[in-house]
Structure formats: C-alpha cells, structure tokens
C-alpha cells in the first residue's frame, strides 16, 4: 500500500509539548508513534524558520529533536518562486490573511510538492473544511490537480 505523503505545519511539532492541551498533545504523540508504517512526513524551510524563531532555547532544541527522531524530510526549495506565488494567490483570494504568510506558505509547499495531506492543529487558518474547499478551488485554477486535504492529526489517526 502506498504511504500517504503528509506535510506537517509547525503546530503539529509544537503540540508534542502542549501540556495545556493534553488531549491534543497525546493525540500528536500517538500520531508520531504510529506514523512510520502509514505515512511519509515532510516539512519545509518555513517550519524550520518558525522553530528557529522560538525564543526558549531549550524548547527550540526539543522541537529539532522531534524532527530528527521521526525521520521527517525537509522539502527542497528548488521551486521557491512557485511556492511564493501560490501563497500570494491564497492571500489575494482572502483564503488566508495577509498577516499569516507562513500559513499560506505551508499550504503552497504542500500543494506544489503534491502532498496528500497538510496536517495542522490550526483550525482557524488551515485544518478547516471551508479553507480546504477554497484552497482546492485556487489550486485547480492554477493547474494543481493533486488532491490536498487540510486536516488535524485526529483525522489521520490509525484506529
């Protein structure tokens, strides 16, 4: 069976340590424990930059350890202009606010690199049916036909 290609936004990595949201934290940890057979996991340099902006050096290091421990691949930047242009399109269409350029970049990376799923705990801007429908519409207008789902870890858990 073909593995799902899953793009992780930064929230998924952060929620491994979300003591203030124990249900989501445990779901995230369980997702990472179960992923190796079912999923190939990816991030972009945007995720790495967001992690590197973490002000607490100990937490920043723990986030990098999560990436290393779970065989998470970093997508290449050889098509950075294409990604930036598509992210700008999501903003122009009002799908993602201008102030959330990183969120638009996450979606664009997932789209351009033909991920099956963008995984996020950000229900407002990413893991959201309305956003998914709008993203799919823009993607089709722009010639990206590979289906992309925008979901939370709860929706891909192995039961």
Image: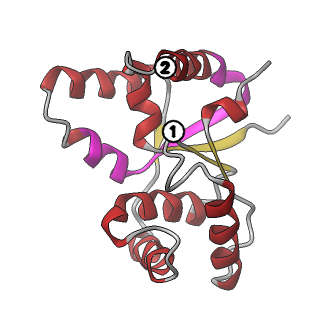
Determine which quarter of the picture holds residue 133.
bottom right
Vertical position of residue 78 compared to residue 120: above or below: below
Q: Earlier in the sequence, mark 1 or mark 2?
A: 2
As measured in the structure, the alpha-carbon distance from the residue carrying label 1 to the one carrying label 2 is 10 Å
Point out which mark residue 94 bears.
none
Vertical position of residue 96 compared to residue 154: above or below: below
Towards the viewer: 43 or 107: 107
Q: Position of residue 39 (x, y in %)?
A: 67, 33
Residue furthest right in the image = 1
Determine which quarter of the picture holds residue 146.
bottom right
Q: Is residue 138 magenta?
A: no
Q: Is residue 37 left or right of residue 47?
A: right
- Helix, strand or loop for disc 2: helix
Point out which mark residue 121 bears.
1
**Start and end of the magenta stretch?**
34-51
Judging by the rendered image, the residue that carries numbered circle 2 is 25
Q: Residue at x 39, y 76 (%)?
A: 81
Q: Residue at x 35, y 62 (%)?
A: 100
Q: Residue at x 42, y 31 (%)?
A: 13
Q: Quadrant of the C terminus?
A: top right
Magenta span: helix, strand or loop, mainly?
A: helix
Q: Residue at x 47, y 34 (%)?
A: 12
């Amino acid at each position: 069976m073909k593995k799902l290609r899953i793009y992780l936004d930064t929230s998924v990595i952060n929620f491994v340590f979300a003591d203030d949201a124990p249900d989501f934290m445990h779901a995230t940890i369980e997702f990472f424990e179960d992923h190796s057979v079912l999923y190939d996991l990816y991030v972009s340099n945007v995720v790495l930059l967001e992690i590197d902006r973490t002000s607490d050096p100990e937490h920043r290091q723990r986030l990098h350890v999560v990436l290393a421990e779970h065989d998470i691949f970093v997508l290449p930047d050889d098509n950075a202009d294409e990604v930036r242009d598509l992210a700008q399109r999501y903003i122009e269409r009002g799908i993602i606010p201008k102030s959330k350029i990183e969120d638009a970049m996450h979606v664009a990376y997932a789209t351009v690199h033909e991920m099956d799923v963008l995984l996020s705990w950000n229900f407002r801007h990413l893991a959201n049916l309305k956003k998914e429908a709008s993203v799919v519409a823009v993607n089709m207008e722009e010639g990206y036909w590979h289906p992309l789902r925008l979901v939370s870890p709860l929706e891909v858990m192995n039961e």
